[in-house]
Image: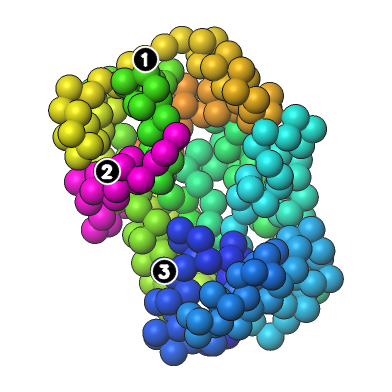
Amino acid sequence: MNIVLTGSIGNIGNPLTKELVNKGHEVTVISSNEKRREAIEALGAKAAIGSMFDPDFLTETFTGADIVYLMETMEAAGDLFDKNVDFIGKISEIGRHYKTAVERSGVKKIIHLSSIGAHTDKGTGIIVFHHHVEQILKELPDHVAIKFIRPVGIYFNMFSFISTIKNKGAIISNWGGDRKEPWVSPLDIAAVVAEETEKPFEGRTVRYVASDEVSPDEIAKALGEAIGKPDLQWKVIADEELLKNWLDIGFNEQVAKGFVETQASQGSGILYEDYQQHQPVLGKVKLADFAKEFAEAYQNDEG
């Protein structure tokens, strides 16, 4: 098949591109960075360099595709420290450009990488943009089949713990405790997306992706042991204190407030309400596997 991938070749795009190329598909990878062209072509894919904010470029690239894989990231909208960016608005704009390009190009099959929490626009914080983009894509005509893939929290988000462990000797957040919650590896996300490209498309479907279910306390124990700090603690602070910490280091206010609310929804369980009703079979990459990767990043971090 002819498959177009948005999102360049990051944590998910790289293994996804490799797998689809290995299966014999003709793969085009969209990137906004010309410097990525050589790496994309080295994987056996075609590079299409252009902007998510250019519907004409997207239309041209989508034309002739059997399947288009759509994803949006905060990085595509701007710098998290830029005080003037409306991330939720900018990402919704990307969603509208996707919709326009799909309509113009005649694509009939879409896989959209969304997120846990996309079932609602209430109480999930910054990730509400995934809900908005899902709603925009649902406005497409019924003959366009869409598979919404909703990964849970991705392991690599834990790399943000490194600085507080080094500077304050603990993982610090506004939620914690011993209640298990789902996490996922980008490798398992890529495997599910690749699997779905070869399954029938019909109507609008939702599939959650998770690799392991562990509590914050278990995460602290596993990561602590991996980095030689077996007594590492996960400490819980108030929303207001966490918000102040993030604003003090220069985060965009929408981003800081949004992340605090997203993490609070993890603690309250709001984030997981729909996931609990549609729990997936867990993937292959467990927390113990990621802990090794975390330890390597921790040792190599000079901050």
In this figure, which residue is indicated by the disc labeled 1? 236
Question: Tag 1, which secondary structure?
Answer: strand
Q: Earlier in the sequence, mark 3 or mark 2?
A: 3
* Left or right: 87, with 246 as reference point: right
Numbered disc in front, either 1 or 2: 2
In this figure, which residue is indicated by the disc labeled 2? 295
Magenta stretch: includes residue 144: no
Magenta stretch: includes residue 282: yes
Q: Position of residue 43 (x, y in %)?
A: 48, 80
Between 206 and 246, the one lying in front of the other is 246
Q: Residue at x 61, y 17 (%)?
A: 248
Q: Is residue 25 above or below residue 272?
A: below
Quarter-of-image position of residue 216? top left
* Left or right: 271, with 139 as reference point: left
* Residue type indicated by callout 3: Pro
* Residue type indicated by callout 2: Ala
Q: Residue at x 62, y 75 (%)?
A: 37
Q: Residues within 10 Å of mark 2 (few under 14, many from 20)?
A: some
The stretch of residues the image draws in magenta is: 278-303
Q: Is residue 199 above or below residue 9?
A: below
* Residue type indicated by callout 1: Val
- Residue at the extreme bottom: 24
Q: Position of residue 72 (x, y in %)?
A: 62, 53
Real-space Cα distance between discs 1 and 3? 35 Å
Between 93 and 149, the one lying in front of the other is 93
Between 95 and 251, the one lying in front of the other is 251
Quarter-of-image position of residue 94? bottom right
Give the number of the disc on residue 15.
3
